[in-house]
Image (cartoon, rainbow, N blue to C red):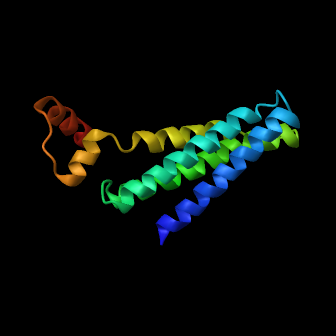
């Protein structure tokens, strides 16, 4: 049930990104709406790709759902703050845009090759095994 919800959210993010790109070009040029539009559009495409990989069983479902939800939350926080500042002249809350960008960055770094390999029990090269042991020891 969560994958269709993520796909609907990705569609809404894509539509919002198109609207913000148009507003940035016509209604409020120079207000920074282009970066908010790009953030929504790129994350929407990544969420669609991630849901396809989860559906095919390529990504470990629990970790992928957390990452995809964090991408949605981070992109919406960042873009919402930038759009509100461009149109209304005030922020969503202090540090909302940096928090959203950091949230999306954290989510993207939550699934590197080492953790994916650990989830599937795959063999790692010896140099990665030492790095993974250090990661797990922290």
Residue 94 x, y percent position in the rendering: 73, 40
Q: Relative to 60, is 133 on the left or the right?
A: left
Residue 71, can we see it?
A: yes
Q: Which residue is drawn at 68% across and 33% down?
A: 35
Q: Relative to 59, is 29 on the left or the right?
A: right
Residue 63 x, y percent position in the rendering: 37, 55
The quadrant of the rendering that contains the C terminus is top left
Q: Which residue is drawn at 59% across and 46% down?
A: 74
Residue 101 x, y percent position in the rendering: 59, 38
Residue 110 x, y percent position in the rendering: 39, 44
* Image-quadrant location for residue 18: top right
Residue 95, can we see it?
A: no
Nearest the eye: 109 or 95:
109
* Image-quadrant location for residue 135: top left
Nearest the eye: 92 or 125:
125
Q: Which residue is drawn at 47% across and 41% down?
A: 106
Nearest the eye: 117 or 130:
117
Residue, far bottom: 1
Q: Relative to 85, is 120 on the left or the right?
A: left
Nearest the eye: 133 or 28:
28
Q: Residue at x 76, y 46 (%)?
A: 19
């Amino acid at each position: 049930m969560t994958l269709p919800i993520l796909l609907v959210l990705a569609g809404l993010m894509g539509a919002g990104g198109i609207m913000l790109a148009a507003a940035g070009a016509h209604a409020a040029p120079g207000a920074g709406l282009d970066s908010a539009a790009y953030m929504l559009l790129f994350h929407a495409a990544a969420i669609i790709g991630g849901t396809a990989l989860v559906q095919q069983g390529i990504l470990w479902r629990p970790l992928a759902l957390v990452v995809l939800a964090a991408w949605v939350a981070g992109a919406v926080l960042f873009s919402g703050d930038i759009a509100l500042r461009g149109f209304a002249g005030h922020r969503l809350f202090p540090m909302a845009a940096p928090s959203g960008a950091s949230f999306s960055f954290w989510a993207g770094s939550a699934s590197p090759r080492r953790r994916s390999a650990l989830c599937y029990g795959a063999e790692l090269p010896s140099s990665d095994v030492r790095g993974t042991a250090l990661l797990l020891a922290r």
